[in-house]
Amino acid sequence: SGNMYVADLNNNVIRKINSDGVVSTFAGSGSFSYADGTGTAASFNNLERIAVDLSGNVYVTDRNNHKIRKITPAGVVTTLAGSSGGSANGSGTAAQFSSPKGIAVDNSGNVYVADTNNHRIRKITPAGAVTTLAGSSYGDSDGTGTGAQFQSPQDVAVDGSGNVYVADTNNSKVKKITPAGVVTTLAGSTVGYLDGTGTAAMFAYPKGIEVDGAGNIY
């Protein structure tokens, strides 16, 4: 619809900018706390990143609250998943994250989260059921599901086929995860700066990632 949403970090609010450039506070009171509610009645604690689904719902990684929040187009904020800091799969507040950062949503409404301090990529269904798509302990390993390892991944993106791309920050690599959870290294090797193909290329601690409609990754 041409609206832009901004994670206004130090103001601790989500701002909305419409296509005419009019800025409003979409959600958040500005206090560093935790409360569900509508618009400025809600609060976050170091909100990190945002994603928007096809229905206009906005998803937020509420980093210091270790929660994933959902905001409807009317500004109603609820907790989709997460409780205290930790690592647990489950539904809604039975699940746990540890300082989540990156977030993306697919065409079916599934949400993917870079669970940074747990070194995992988590998947949340529209109903709030949380599973670990890939990752286990701190390390660097391709594999399937929990057989793979990341090092403090900070962002994720998802393409139209449901493949998830990961900015594997401390490994200085870009990883790809298929819908079945198979993790491969798409690009990157050791820390540095070099163009090239696949592992011949080098990055230095990549943090953000996006994918376009043609499958190109930025």
Image (cartoon, rainbow, N blue to C red):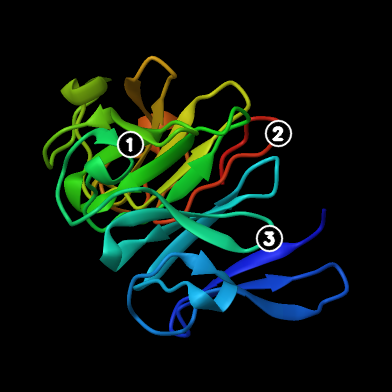
Mark 1, residue position: 122
Picture quadrant where residue 76 is located: bottom right
Residue depicted at 38% across the width and 14% down the height: 180
Q: Look at label 1 and name its amino acid.
A: Arg
Residue depicted at 23% across the width and 34% down the height: 89
* Mark closest to the chain's N terminus, 3 or 1: 3
31 lies left or right of 210: left
- Neighbor class of circle 2 (other Cα within 10 Å; few <14, some 14-19, many 20+) is few
Mark 3, residue position: 74
* Mark closest to the chain's N terminus, 2 or 3: 3
> x and y percent of residue 7 in the render?
53, 70
- Neighbor class of circle 1 (other Cα within 10 Å; few <14, some 14-19, many 20+) is many
Mark 2, residue position: 213
31 lies left or right of 134: right
218 lies left or right of 116: right
Q: Are the residues tagged 3 and 1 within 8 Å (C-beta)?
A: no
- Residues 106 and 92: in front is 92
Q: Are the residues tagged 2 and 3 within 8 Å (C-beta)?
A: no
- Residue 95 seen anywhere in this rendered image of the structure: no
> x and y percent of residue 177 in the render?
39, 25
Label 2 sits on a secondary structure element that is loop
Label 3 sits on a secondary structure element that is loop
Label 1 sits on a secondary structure element that is strand
> x and y percent of residue 118 in the render?
18, 46
Q: Look at label 2 and name its amino acid.
A: Gly
- In the rendered image of this protein, does residue 210 appear above or below residue 76? above
The Cα atoms of the two marked residues, 2 and 3, are separated by 28 Å
- In the rendered image of this protein, does residue 184 appear above or below residue 168? above
- In the rendered image of this protein, does residue 212 appear above or below residue 100? above
> x and y percent of residue 17 in the render?
74, 72
